[in-house]
Image (cartoon, rainbow, N blue to C red):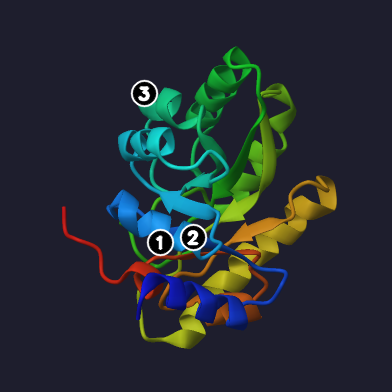
Amino acid sequence: MPIAAAIRQLRKELPSTVQLVAVSKFKPVEDILEAYRAGQRDFGENRPQELATKARVLPGDIRWHFIGHLQTNKVKLVVPCATLIHSVDSERLLAEIDKTARALGRTMDILLEIHIAEETTKQGLTPEEALALAGRIGAYPGVRLRGVMGMATFTDDQAQVRREFRTLKGVSQQLLALWPDCDQVSMGMSEDWRIAIEEGTTLVRIGTSIFGKRDSR
């Protein structure tokens, strides 16, 4: 399916309460522009240098989401151009984002990445660690905590995926009770976004269903 047609089809299926982030990692500028011309404005990247490069050459009203693992020494590439960093998984990273954002005179919106999958390869904080870190967020005026992100186990067991998404939603609700800005839940990708919607996501990160399978790198 052409990119523009895929965008239109997803928009028909997504509730108005759910924002589509088109995961454009490894995809060429031409593909992103096709999605942009179809009205898409939110795009997700997972490599700092690739994000910085694309942000320089693509339209300025694109909202860039950083969705990959972020090393502290790469924060300076991401903060100047990202709208939302989904993958904050340590206080050390949070502190570096805060410092970089304040130096640029901006406030960086972030999500805490929660480890919900039964896979050791996935990154993230435990729910307990996330809640504790959120309690210290006032020490970092250069960031604004907007919510949580998580990735479910890659499995055909939909009941397991649903349980993991419910865990993430539960953390989100605990945060929202304390901080009213924490209203974002980033969960759901090409293979499980429908379950994520049923479990209360506000952001879905969809790449393959829009751009096709990515090139291996």
Residue 76 rendering spot, x and y as whole percentages? 44, 23
User: Considering the numbered disc 2 on the image, is that residue within a helix, a strand or a loop?
Assistant: helix
Of the image marks 1 and 3, the number of the one nearer the N terminus:
1
The amino acid marked with disc number 2 is Arg
Does the CB distance between marks 2 and 1 fall below 8 Å? yes
Q: Mark 3 to mark 2: distance in Å?
A: 34 Å
The amino acid marked with disc number 1 is Glu
User: Considering the numbered disc 1 on the image, is that residue within a helix, a strand or a loop?
Assistant: helix
Residue 42 rendering spot, x and y as whole percentages? 54, 54
The amino acid marked with disc number 3 is Asn
Q: Which mark is residue 37?
A: 2
Q: Which residue is mark 1?
A: 34
Q: Residue at x 83, y 53 (%)?
A: 177
Mark nearest the camera among 1 and 3 is 1
Total marks in image: 3
- Note whether 32 is above or below 97 in the view shown: below
Q: Which residue is mark 3?
A: 73
Of the image marks 3 and 2, the number of the one nearer the N terminus:
2
Q: Residue at x 34, y 64 (%)?
A: 119
Residue 197 rendering spot, x and y as whole percentages? 62, 77
Q: Residues within 10 Å of mark 1 (few under 14, many from 20)?
A: some
Q: Quadrant of the N terminus?
A: bottom left
Q: Mark 1 to mark 3: distance in Å?
A: 32 Å
Q: Residues within 10 Å of mark 3 (few under 14, many from 20)?
A: few
Residue 162 in sight: no
Q: Residue at x 53, y 76 (%)?
A: 8
Of residues 71 and 122, which is closer to you in this image?
71
- Note whether 124 is above or below 215 in the view shown: above
